[in-house]
Amino acid sequence: MNRGMRWSRGTFSVLLRVAGQFKPQPFPVAGIVSGAFGIFQGDKKGPASGEGSPRFSLVLVPSGGFLYTYSRQIDCKVLAEELAPLDVAWSAQDAKQITGAGIATARALLRSGQRLAPVMIRGDPAGIAERHRFEVV
C-alpha cells in the first residue's frame, strides 16, 4: 500500500447529472487531492448539504468520474492508496482510456471496496475501463 500519498486541499470537477441534460456535466467541488485522486464530501447527487449521514466520494480528478462512495473519508484514502501504485492510466481524461496492466487488479479492488465500508452498489463495477462510474445507493 502506498502510504506516501500527500493530500492537499483543492477544487476539482466531478461529473453530475443535471436535470434536462443527457450526459453528466462537470460540477466544481472542494475537497482534497493527491495525484489523480480527489475526495469530496458528497456523492453522485452533489456536494453534501449537511443533512443526513456524511458521504465521501473518491473520484478521478482528470475525468471527474466517481470510483466509490463511503461514509468515512479515511476509507476513500485507503482505497486511493491501494489503487495509486497500480500500472493504470489514472490520468486519462477519457474513461475509455483508463487502461493498463493493473486494470484487473484495480477492478478487483473496486469490487472489494465493500470490505472497507458497507455500501450497496448498483451496476457492474468490473466495467471501470469502459465506464469507470458506480451508482451508489
Image: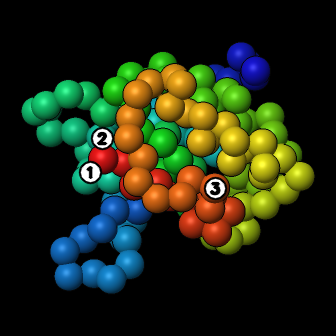
User: Looking at the picture, which amino acid does disc 3 mark?
Assistant: Ala
Question: 98 left or right of 111?
Answer: right
Q: Quadrant of residue 53?
A: top left
Residue 126: mark: 3
Mark positioned earlier in the residue sequence (3 or 2): 2
Q: In the orientation shown, which residue stands out farthest toward the left? A: 51
Q: Which residue is mark 2?
A: 42
Mark 3, mark 1: which one is toward the viewer?
Answer: 3
Report helix, strand or loop for mark 2. Answer: strand
Q: Quadrant of residue 106?
A: top right
Mark 3, mark 2: which one is toward the viewer?
Answer: 3
**Which residue lies at the image location 25% right of the left edge and 71% below the top edge?**
18
**Which residue lies at the image location 15% right of the left edge and 39% below the top edge?**
49
Q: Quadrant of the N terminus?
A: top right
Residue 64: mark: none
Q: What percent of the width, then of the height, locates residue 108?
A: 69, 42
- The chosen color scheme is rainbow
User: Looking at the picture, which amino acid does disc 2 mark?
Assistant: Gly
Whether residues under marks 3 and 1 lie with C-beta atoms below 8 angstroms apart, the answer is no
Question: 133 left or right of 57?
Answer: right
Whole-angstrom CA distance, mark 3 to mark 2, is 23 Å
Q: Which residue is mark 1?
A: 46
Q: Residues within 10 Å of mark 2 (few under 14, many from 20)?
A: many
Report helix, strand or loop for mark 3. Answer: helix
Q: Establish if 13 lies above or below 31.
A: below
Q: What percent of the width, then of the height, locates residue 76?
A: 51, 29
**Which residue lies at the image location 20% right of the left edge and 82% below the top edge?**
20
Q: Establish if 108 lies above or below 63.
A: above
Q: Establish if 16 lies above or below 101.
A: below
User: Looking at the picture, which amino acid does disc 1 mark?
Assistant: Gly
